[in-house]
Amino acid sequence: MRLILVGPPGAGKGTQAVQLAKHFGIPHISTGDIFRSNLKAETELGKLAKSFMDKGELVPDSVTNEMVRDRFKQADVKKGFLLDGFPRNIAQADELSRILQEVNLNLDAVLELQIADAEIVRRLSGRRTCKECGAIFHQEFEPSKQKDVCDKCGGSLYQREDDKESVIIHRLAIYAQQTKPIIDYYRTKGVLKQMSAVGTVSQISADAISLLSK
Ligand code: AMP
């Protein structure tokens, strides 16, 4: 399965990506996760990305595209892949086509997770992320057993700078302007599949798997 997951911030792409990657036995490639791990390791790439990420802006294409091109040099992508958070604009989608051509791979599907803006703000502003292992909790829907402590590793939970309400609203505007056009781009290519991102995590995974298996 060679898959792209698209959807606004807060649609649950990260959560679903983990489930789907496990189900299909393919690597989960999240550009946001790669940036966050570089940020944590204080690499040059991390320092560069931080100012954009904190404001909810896109990291420049030249940087992001090269990072993805590098990732596609690893052999594991031959068994399939799930891209989460990339591409985020038409220029990145064009670049991805070139990268896939270079490594001789085709896309099977682009799955769009659909959800209303008001629901997104509710979901994201309550989200808490583990500083250590990246596990995600939600103050309202999936609280950790002990406040601000990760159930999985005991690390401390924090609110990502880009999950603050003013930043969320800005990210939604960027999504509408820059990322939404890729939906039509992939529709034209005949690979687009769309589904609702409202429901329980397991229900949405099951729907996604059945849609992708058609
Ligand atoms: P995410 O975890 O996918 O929401 O990504 C977090 C942040 O990383 C985004 O708000 C951007 O600042 C940056 N980022 C992730 N993926 C991309 C991308 N494909 N292009 C540009 N910036 C990105």
Image (tube, rainbow, N blue to C red):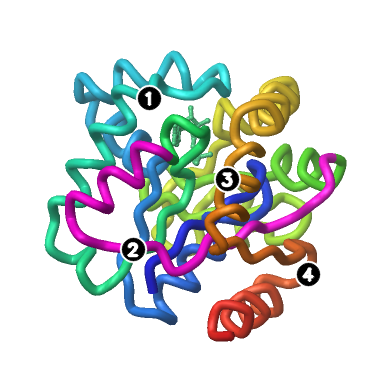
Q: Amino acid at mark 1?
A: Asp
Q: Which residue is mark 1?
A: 61
Q: Nearer the viewer, residue 69 or 170?
A: 69
Q: Position of residue 127 (x, y in %)?
A: 65, 45
Discs 3/1, front: 3
Q: Position of residue 16 (x, y in %)?
A: 56, 65
Q: Nearer the viewer, residue 106 or 79?
A: 106
Q: Amino acid at mark 2?
A: Asn
Judge left or right: residue 39 versus residue 22: left
Q: Mark 1: is the Cβ under 8 angstroms from ligand 1?
A: yes
Q: Is residue 102 magenta?
A: yes
Q: Disc 4 or 1, which lies upstream in sequence?
A: 1
Residue at 14% over, 56% down: 74
Q: Are marks 1 and 2 in contact (CB under 8 Å)?
A: no
Q: Secondary structure at mark 4?
A: loop
Q: Position of residue 152 (x, y in %)?
A: 44, 64
Q: Secondary structure at mark 1?
A: helix
Residue at 33% over, 78% down: 25
Residue at 61% over, 85% down: 210
Query: Splitting the image into 4 quarters, where does residue 185 fall?
Result: top right
Q: Which residue is mark 2?
A: 106
Q: Disc 4 or 3, which lies upstream in sequence?
A: 3
Judge left or right: residue 44 versus residue 83: left
Discs 1/2, front: 2
Q: How many marks?
A: 4
Q: Which residue is mark 3?
A: 185
Q: Position of residue 103 (x, y in %)?
A: 18, 55
Q: Are marks 4 and 3 in contact (CB under 8 Å)?
A: no
Q: Secondary structure at mark 3?
A: helix
Neighbours of disc 1 within 10 Å: few (<14), some (14-19), many (20+): some
What range is drawn magenta here? 94-117
